[in-house]
Amino acid sequence: MKHTIKYVLPLFLWAVAAAPLSAQIDSIVKGILDHAASQSRQPQPQQQRRTQTTRQSSSPSRQAKRPFDGTWLATQSKVNPEGQQMISRTFTMIIKEGKATKTLDTSNASSPDKPFYASIYELQRRWTYSSIDCTEQGTSLTIQWSPGQLADWTPKTIPNPVVEGFGAPIAETSVYKLKGDDLTRINDPNGLIYHRAK
């Protein structure tokens, strides 16, 4: 009898203690499942859906890229009509969101018997321009440029008035045609072609 009590009593105590614990676990699991089910049945708020749609439509990857935007480079070299100077020009044009700036770096090299000033045979100048108006129409771009502003020159031993006496670029309107990575100025007798910088 003592041996039976010895084995039955712990078994009885374990069964009594396990019954409430099992019921508690069942209640907790059932509560979690009920809560998850009620959340999935609730409709998504209208305001939250609108915000997500707005974010998706305004993402940068979905906005159309402007075909003319970027940095464009062109170079040109020629000898003046008298054959006394070699003129090299480098144009850098930056177009962004309907506005443009242009830099013209010009290098003039004179013949030994015709110095520019005193004993100076080479003159470098930098001119800057800003767009007054930019009009895009398909693959055509028209830019109305301000007059060129002298930004820098070398050598500095040549006085500013003498440098400006060599001529300053005037205001002008340029018409460009886009084809791939080339932008050709079509109203230029020299047929200046800009290439998109990589």
Image (tube, rainbow, N blue to C red):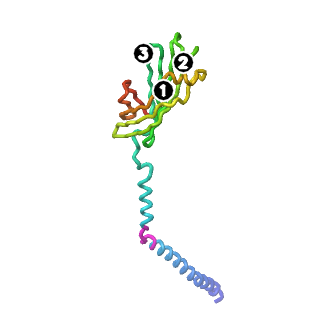
Give the CA distance from mark 1 to mark 2.
Answer: 17 Å
Q: Quadrant of the N terminus?
A: bottom right
Q: Nearer the viewer, residue 167 or 34?
A: 167
Q: Give the percent coordinates (x, y) of residue 95.
A: 45, 38
Q: Is residue 198 visible?
A: no
Residue in the picture at 45% in, 13% down: 83
Amino acid beneath label 2: Glu
Comparing labels 3 and 1, the label whose residue is closer to the camera: 1
Q: Is residue 192 above or below residue 57?
A: above
Measured along the vertical axis of the image, is residue 76 above or below residue 96? above
* Amino acid, disc 3: Pro
Which numbered circle lies on residue 194? none
Q: Specify start and end residues of the magenta stretch as a single range.
A: 38-45
Q: Amino acid at mark 1?
A: Ala
Circles 3, 2 touching at the beta carbon (< 8 Å): no
Tag 1 or tag 3, which sits nearer the N-term? 3
Where disc 3 sits, the SS reads: loop
What is the number of the mark on residue 81?
3
The residue to which callout 2 is attached is: 122
Image location of residue 125, percent across then percent down: 53, 25
Between marks 1 and 2 in the image, the one whose residue lies nearer the viewer: 1
Report which residue position mark 1 lands on: 168
Establish if 125 lies above or below 117: below
